[in-house]
Structures are given as C-alpha cells and as structure tokens.
Image (cartoon, helix red, strand yellow):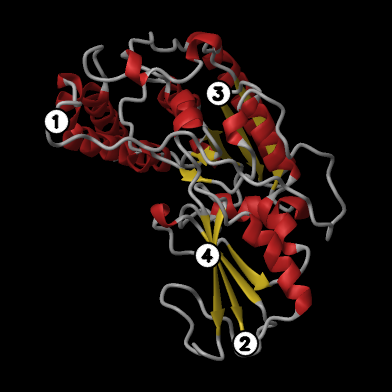
C-alpha cells in the first residue's frame, strides 16, 4: 500500500508539473525562492488581547510595542482588543480566557490565509511577551541568511535524542550541499514587464544552509510553536523535524523522522529552485513565520541583527517598510492596456490554480507517507 501511495503521488506530481511548467510565451521562469523573496509580502499574524475595563498604564506601554508592528500596508501583526466587560462571551473563533485568567490575556493566531484554527500561543500579556513573540536569535539568523543570499534555510528542529539529531543533521547537510551543486536553475525567459527590479544586477545562485534549533530552547519557544502547530500531528511527535524556509520566512510542510530522506529533501529543493509559474501566493505550499525583518532591503544587512538579549528585555525592532509590489491578479476582461499575453494568462488562470493546489497536496502526501 505504501509503495502504491508513493507511485501514485509521483505520477500526480509529474502531471501537476506538466500543467504548471511555463513556456516562454506563458509565464516567467523566475525560481520560486526568488519570486517569493521579491514579490510575496508576509501575511500578518493575528493578535487578540482580552481585558476587562480600562487597561492599566503598565500594559498600555506593552501594547504600544505591538501596535507599532500593526501599522503600514504590510504589517507584521494585526491587533484586536476585546473588552470582556462589554463582550463577556468574547468573539467568534478566538478562545476566550478562563474566568480566572490573568488579564490582559493575549491570543496569537496564524495569518487568516492559512486557515489554521489552532492558536500559536496564549497567555498573560506581560512586558517580556512582545520581544519573544516578534523576535528571537534563530529568526534573526534566518532573515540574515536569506537576505545574504541563501535560497532556503533548512530549519532542523532537534528532538533531544543526540543520536537521532546527529544522524538527521548529517544527512540533511550532505543532501542540501549536493543539491545546491546539482540542481539547475531555470533559464530566465520572462517578458520585460515581468522582470524583477534590479534582476540584472543580482545574478541568481542556488545556496542552501541548515539551522539547528533546540525544541526546548526558551528563547525559541514562539518559533517552535509556530512551526509545530502548522500541522495537526506535529505537536505530539518527538522525532527530528525539518522545515525548509524561504522567501520572507515561508515554511514548507515538515519532513519528520523517517521522512527526512534524500528523495523528500530533493522534492522540496526542486520545488524551490523551479520556475514560479503560479503568481498567486496562497495557492503555493507553506505558512509564513513571524519574522520582523526589513525584507524590502534584501541584500543588505538585516536591521534586526543583534546579539541575544537577556530574557524580559524588550528588543527595539524597526517597523516594516511597505512592499513595493502586490500580488498580481489574473485579467479576465480585455481593455486597450491589456496585452494578448496577459489575456492568455487569464484564460489559463483557473487551470493553473487547480494544478498548484494538486501539487501542494501531493507534496504533503508524499512526505507524510514516509513518516
């Protein structure tokens, strides 16, 4: 049965790839990792703060730190305040704190586009919370590496079993180093209007690295929760777990335990290095992590890079700068300004989205089959 599932998944992958593979007349061949970095603004995490009556001054200062990151065209978070004195039942879709909860109470949820209903984290809103929620040493390193030229950073969430972790890391490092040399990037055949700004000055290269994160590292509690809650069965697993992270902090579905294989690693790397034939971000696999980096200055030092700070210290993180572009939508009607090429793209839009969805499901099913 397992062999059948894998063969069936492989055939579906080939079929999806054939539908999605663009020709020079249909779509640009910019690699997925590069297109995501330059064109996909991060989706904001949803923060709900429950309180009862006026908020004390000490908590207002903490809220200001969160509010700073809820501003702009592409905020890191969206913030909502709920007064339980006026709305004792809370709001739909957000777990209401218990009557004995220490208010104000913060509930952190994934971006709405993920449709993940499990909260990332919930607890009393204290002065140290914004720093741990918005930033951490591993996330700073993730952003630094991607902005420095890494196509993807393979986050290895250690299990705590030294032997298993060492074996998983050895295999992962060997495979990503080999794939970075062997995989070929697509030949750029984009039409002039689809070329990324400054592309000619930034020659493409394929580079992968591995970042090991301790599952019980207190400084990375939020990051660990963000990763593990992306799939229902991950929180209960104790195996080494790998998340390929690319773009502006987008994590692909996890490779877990026995699923950390050369074949599955190659699947993910091939997807990242392949042409981004579907411009709609939400039809591509992955979940955005909360990284407060200035992505519109890619190629420059990460502005939040700094040595680790003591627990409880608020980290001043610069506000995000609005991204210069938004996700283009398929054109469905003709006008004097619409080229025949874009009319063709509009005509195949639905087929492309369905194929992208199929590819996403195939990717996840193949990886799950090996767990």
Where residue 65 sits, quadrant-wise, is bottom right
Q: Which residue is mark 3?
A: 151
Residue 309 image point, x, y percent: 85, 49
Circle 2 packing at 10 Å, graded few (<14), some (14-19), many (20+), is some
Q: Could you tell me which secondary element the residue under label 3 belongs to?
A: loop
Residue 209 image point, x, y percent: 64, 25
Disc assigned to residue 335: 1
For residue 173, say whether it is visible: yes
Q: Which residue is mark 4?
A: 119
- Against 354, residue 265 (above or below) is above
- Against 264, residue 164 (above or below) is below
Q: Which residue is mark 2?
A: 52
| Residue 238 in the figure: left or right of residue 232 | right
Q: Nearer the viewer, mark 1 or mark 2?
A: 1
Circle 4 packing at 10 Å, graded few (<14), some (14-19), many (20+), is some
For the point 51% across and 52% down, which residue is it? Answer: 44
Alpha carbon distance from label 1 to label 2:
54 Å
- Against 124, residue 281 (above or below) is above
Q: Could you tell me which secondary element the residue under label 4 belongs to?
A: loop
For the point 17% across and 34% down, which residue is it? Answer: 351
């Amino acid at each position: 049965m397992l062999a059948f599932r894998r063969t069936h998944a492989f055939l579906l992958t080939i079929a999806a790839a054939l539908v999605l593979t663009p020709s020079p007349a249909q779509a640009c061949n910019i690699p997925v990792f590069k297109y995501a970095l330059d064109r996909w603004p991060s989706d904001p995490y949803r923060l709900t703060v429950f309180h009862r009556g006026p908020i004390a001054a000490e908590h207002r200062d903490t809220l200001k730190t969160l509010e700073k990151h809820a501003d702009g065209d592409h905020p890191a978070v969206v913030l909502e305040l709920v007064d339980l004195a006026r709305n004792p039942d809370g709001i739909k879709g957000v777990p209401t704190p218990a009557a004995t909860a220490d208010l104000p109470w913060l509930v952190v949820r994934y971006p709405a586009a993920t449709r993940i209903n499990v909260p990332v984290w919930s607890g009393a809103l204290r002065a140290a919370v914004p720093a741990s929620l918005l930033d951490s040493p591993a996330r700073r390193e993730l952003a630094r590496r991607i902005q420095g030229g890494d196509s993807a950073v393979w986050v290895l969430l250690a299990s705590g079993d030294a032997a298993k972790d060492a074996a998983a890391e050895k295999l992962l490092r060997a495979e990503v180093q080999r794939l970075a040399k062997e995989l070929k990037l697509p030949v750029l055949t984009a039409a002039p209007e689809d070329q990324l700004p400054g592309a000619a000055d930034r020659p493409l290269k394929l580079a992968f690295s591995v970042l090991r994160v301790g599952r019980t590292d207190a400084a990375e509690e939020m990051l660990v929760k963000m990763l593990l809650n992306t799939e229902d069965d991950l929180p209960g697993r104790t195996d080494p777990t790998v998340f390929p992270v690319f773009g502006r902090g987008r994590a692909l579905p996890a490779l877990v335990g026995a699923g950390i294989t050369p074949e599955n690693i190659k699947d993910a790397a091939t997807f990242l290095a392949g042409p981004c034939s579907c411009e709609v971000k939400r039809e591509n696999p992955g979940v955005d992590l909360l990284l407060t980096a200035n992505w519109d200055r890619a190629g420059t030092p990460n502005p939040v890079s700094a040595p680790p700070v003591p627990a409880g210290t608020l980290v001043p993180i610069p506000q995000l700068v609005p991204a210069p572009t938004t996700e283009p939508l398929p054109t469905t009607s003709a006008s004097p300004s619409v080229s025949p090429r874009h009319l063709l793209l509009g005509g195949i839009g639905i087929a492309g989205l369905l194929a992208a969805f199929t590819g996403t499901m195939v990717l996840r099913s193949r990886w799950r089959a090996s767990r």
